[in-house]
Amino acid sequence: MENVILVIHLMLALTLIVVVLLQRSEGGGLGMGGGGGGAVSSRGAATALGKITWALAIGFLVTSMTLTIIAAQKSAGSSVIDRLGDEAPADSSVPALPGGEGLLPPSAGDAPLTPPRAD
């Protein structure tokens, strides 16, 4: 159920972005003004886009709150503080690290890995 709501939430977010970008600027917001023409120039279309924006925004908020409630119900009864005292199970499939000597870079006195070539 959570995945379905999350997909709807993402589609609402993307659609809301597109609808907001399609709207005509009413000027003054970023100093760019609402210069002539554009794809949406009539006032009727602007109010229709405004209504669509409101509907998408309400849907976005509803899905946001629903996802928050679902996340709160999933985490009910558990706390990060409670989990701090628990020891992590030892995983035997992880190889042990080599000793401290194997982790250091070779020093100048170490023997080279390849023997010198006899020319």
Image (cartoon, rainbow, N blue to C red):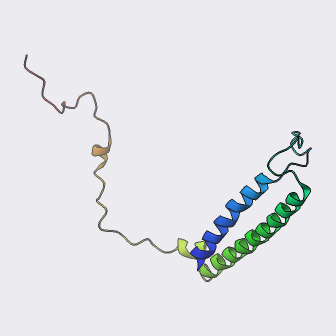
Looking at the image, residue 106 lies above or below residue 48: above
Quarter containing the N terminus? bottom right
Viewer-nearest residue: 64 or 82: 64
The picture places residue 105, in percent across and down from the top left corner, at 31, 36
Considering depth in this image, is 19 or 37 the residue closer to the camera? 37
Location of the C terminus (image quadrant): top left
The part of the image, by quadrant, that contains residue 30 is top right
Identify whether 7 is placed above or below 72. Answer: above
Between residues 113 and 12, which one lies in front from this camera angle?
12
Q: In x, y percent, where is residue 18?
A: 72, 56
The residue sitting at 28% across, 59% down in the picture is 95
Residue extending farthest to the left is 118
Residue 104 x, y percent position in the rendering: 32, 40
x, y percent for residue 102: 27, 45
Q: How many marks?
A: 0
At 31% from the left and 62% from the top, the residue drawn is: 94
Q: Is residue 113 left or right of residue 91?
A: left
Residue 85 located left or right of residue 97: right
* Nearer to me, 86 or 5: 5
* Residue at 43%, 71% in the rendered image: 88
